[in-house]
Amino acid sequence: MKKIVGSLTLCLCLLTGLVMAGIEAKPFDDPAKESLYRQLVADLRCLVCQNQNLADSNAELAVDLRRQVHEMVTRGDTGDQVTDYMVQRYGEFVLYSPPMNARTALLWLGPIVALLFGLFVAWRVAGSRRGPEQGGVSEADVARARDLLNK
């Protein structure tokens, strides 16, 4: 009996999470518009969440932006028009894949520059740890050092 009550309690607890999750159904008269809407909310970033797109976010701003995207798509705006509107209003941060330009060059090239810098530092550190036979020290200098150490 305790097992049954425990199982039912667990099931009810799990179901309350599903009930509390907001299911957002947007009506569309055209499957192409629905597809465009889904693509746009997946490609646009939620501005208050950390690395979530509009489709995955439950923040109030994300809900408002999804509503705005829905209105624009339903009105007949193209994907480029919706994206341009969002970029004009919120900046390029709203894009999950910002275009390569002067303002985003560091974003795109920063990891490559950091990798090259790390490889250069590793090469320099490895070069400074070379032994006498690799470091360009003459045999006469090595023999003189041995003589001094043996005295």
Image (tube, helix red, strand yellow):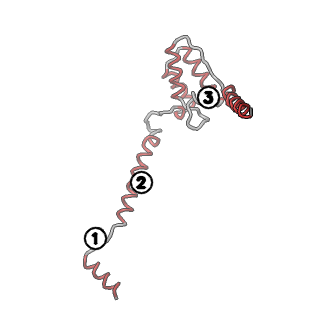
Element marked by disc 3:
helix
Question: Residue at the bottom extreme?
Answer: 151
Position of 126 relative to 16 (above/below): below
Residue 35: x percent and y percent?
50, 19
Residue drawn at (49%, 21%), measured in percent from left and top? Answer: 79
Identify the amino acid type marked 2.
Gly
> How far apart in space, not on screen, are marks 1 and 2 (Cα)?
26 Å
Look at discs 1 and 3 and give the one toward the viewer.
1
Mark found first going from the N terminus, 1 or 2? 2
Write down the residue under mark 3: 62
Residue drawn at (41%, 48%), measured in percent from left and top? Answer: 113
> How far apart in space, not on screen, are marks 1 and 3 (Cα)?
64 Å
Residue 124: x percent and y percent?
37, 61
In which quarter of the view is residue 142 placed? bottom left
Write down the residue under mark 2: 118
Instruction: Using residue 18 as the reference point, say whether residue 102 is left or right of it.
Output: left
Question: Residue at the front extreme?
Answer: 1
Position of 114 relative to 28 (above/below): below
Mark found first going from the N terminus, 3 or 2? 3
Residue drawn at (60%, 31%), measured in percent from left and top? Answer: 57
Identify the amino acid type marked 3.
Ala
Identify the amino acid type marked 1.
Glu
Residue drawn at (55%, 31%), measured in percent from left and top? Answer: 53
Write down the residue under mark 1: 133
Residue 88: x percent and y percent?
54, 28
Instruction: Using residue 68 as the reference point, say whether residue 5 is left or right of it.
Output: right
* Residues under numbered marks 1 and 3 in contact, where contact means CB atoms less than 8 Å apart: no
Work out which quarter of the rendered image holds the N terminus and state it.
top right
Asked whether 117 or 90 is in front, the reply is 117
Local packing at callout 2 (Cα closer than 10 Å; few below 14, some 14-19, many 20+) is few
